[in-house]
Image (cartoon, rainbow, N blue to C red):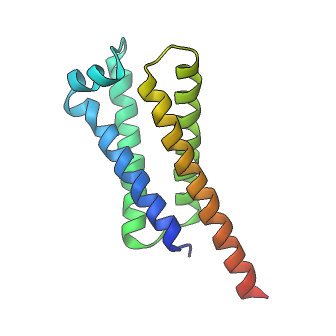
Amino acid sequence: MRGNQLERWVALAQSAEYVSTGIWPLLSMKTFEAITGPKVDRWLVRTVGILVTVSGSVIALAAWRRRITPEIALLGAGSAAGLGAVDLWYSLRGQTRLVYLADSFLQVAFLAGWVTASTREERRRLDNSA
């Protein structure tokens, strides 16, 4: 079982951001577009919102239960890497507003948190087996 404190804090922070930003376009597309820019395919924005909300909810539940398994860590790190890469790519190409560039930095922080926590957990596991 993986359950160190850093993992838990990363999971809680990421899940809070994912649930709040994922549900936002479902509750108010108008305010979402006011910050992120107009969208052509609103159905796609809502679909991504649902998926991000579900991912954040799963990560939050694991943190709340103190049951952060390698699969949860992979969900958190993989989601952060994927969303961060997309944010960075399109913002640097000028195809999205700068808010996406800011979000890419947040995703990098989540990814770094997962990597650091996983490294600490592996060291602790190796120390306990020696």
**Height in image: 58 above or below 94?**
below
Q: Where is residue 50 in the image (x, y as percent from the top left)?
A: 34, 37
Residue in the image at 58% along x and 57% along y: 114
Q: Which residue is outermost to the top? A: 40
From what the image shows, is residue 35 above or below residue 55? above
**Residue at 53 percent of width and 74 percent of height:** 4
Position of the N terminus by quadrant: bottom right
Instruction: Using the image as rendered, state which of residue 50 and residue 125 is in the foreground.
Output: 125
Kindly give the residue lying farthest to the right in the view shown.
130
**Residue at horizontal 50%, vertical 29%?**
101
Q: Which quadrant would residue 128 be assigned to in this image?
A: bottom right
Q: Where is residue 22 in the image (x, y as percent from the top left)?
A: 34, 38
In the rendered image, the vertical position of residue 85 relative to residue 107, given as above or below: above
**Does residue 125 appear to the left or right of 55 in the view shown?**
right
Find residue 8 and report its horizontal and vertical position in percent: 46, 67
Q: How many labels does the image show?
A: 0
**In front: 62, or 96?**
96
Asked if residue 114 is positioned above or below residue 129 in the image, the reply reads above
Residue located 45% across and 23% down the image: 98
Q: Which of 125 and 34 is in front in this view?
A: 34
Quadrant of the drawing holding the C terminus = bottom right
**Of the pair 92 and 7, the residue shown nearer to us:** 92
Q: Where is residue 90 in the image (x, y as percent from the top left)?
A: 54, 20
